[in-house]
Amino acid sequence: MGAKPMTEIYPNLVYSDLGGDFNLDGITVKVLIVQLEGSSEWTLEVRNSKGTSIVWDEAFADDRDAYDEFKRQVADEGMKSFFEDSNVIPFARPRP
């Protein structure tokens, strides 16, 4: 009996209209507020111009809560907080 191909179904992503490019003090980041289709929770991700992605651990009840958290971070820590390397966890690199 041969192996049967396994078909995986991936849920669609729903992007909030509250996300997008955000510019302040000459610094631009991309704000992504995303929900898996059928889920009630939203996630928050901020990508800086270096390609670093900052993802919040906690989920949010709605997209407005996620956006409010982003704005709180900007107000409390400033836009430069999205460029700090202290929060970066590097991916493992293959050994040569």
Image (cartoon, grey):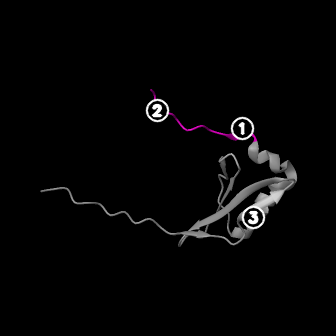
Examine the image and state in which quarter residue 88 appears: top right
Residue type beneath disc 2 = Pro
Residue, far left: 1
Mark 1 Cα-neighbour bin, 10 Å: few <14, some 14–19, many ≥20 = few
> Which-is-in-front pick, marks 2 and 3?
2
For marks 1 and 3, give the CA distance: 23 Å
> Which-is-in-front pick, marks 1 and 3?
1
Coordinates of residue 15 in the picture (x, y in percent): 62, 69
Q: Is residue 66 visible?
A: no
Examine the image and state in which quarter residue 28 appears: bottom right
Image mark for residue 94: 2
Q: Would you place residue 2 above or below residue 16 in this image?
A: above
Q: Residue at x 79, y 46 (%)?
A: 81
Coordinates of residue 23 in the picture (x, y in percent): 81, 59
First reached walking from the N terminus: tag 1 or tag 2:
1
Residue type beneath disc 1 = Asp
Residue type beneath disc 3 = Tyr
Where does the magenta region start and end? 84-96
Coordinates of residue 11 in the picture (x, y in percent): 48, 67
First reached walking from the N terminus: tag 1 or tag 3:
3
Q: Would you place residue 38 above or below residue 46 in this image?
A: below
Secondary structure category for the residue under label 1: helix
Q: Which residue is mark 3?
A: 67
Mark 2 Cα-neighbour bin, 10 Å: few <14, some 14–19, many ≥20 = few
Q: Residue at x 65, y 52 (%)?
A: 57
Q: Would you place residue 30 above or below residue 92 in this image?
A: below
Coordinates of residue 38 in the picture (x, y in percent): 53, 73
Q: Residue at x 69, y 72 (%)?
A: 17
Q: Which residue is mark 1?
A: 85
For marks 1 and 2, give the CA distance: 21 Å
Secondary structure category for the residue under label 2: loop
First reached walking from the N terminus: tag 2 or tag 3:
3
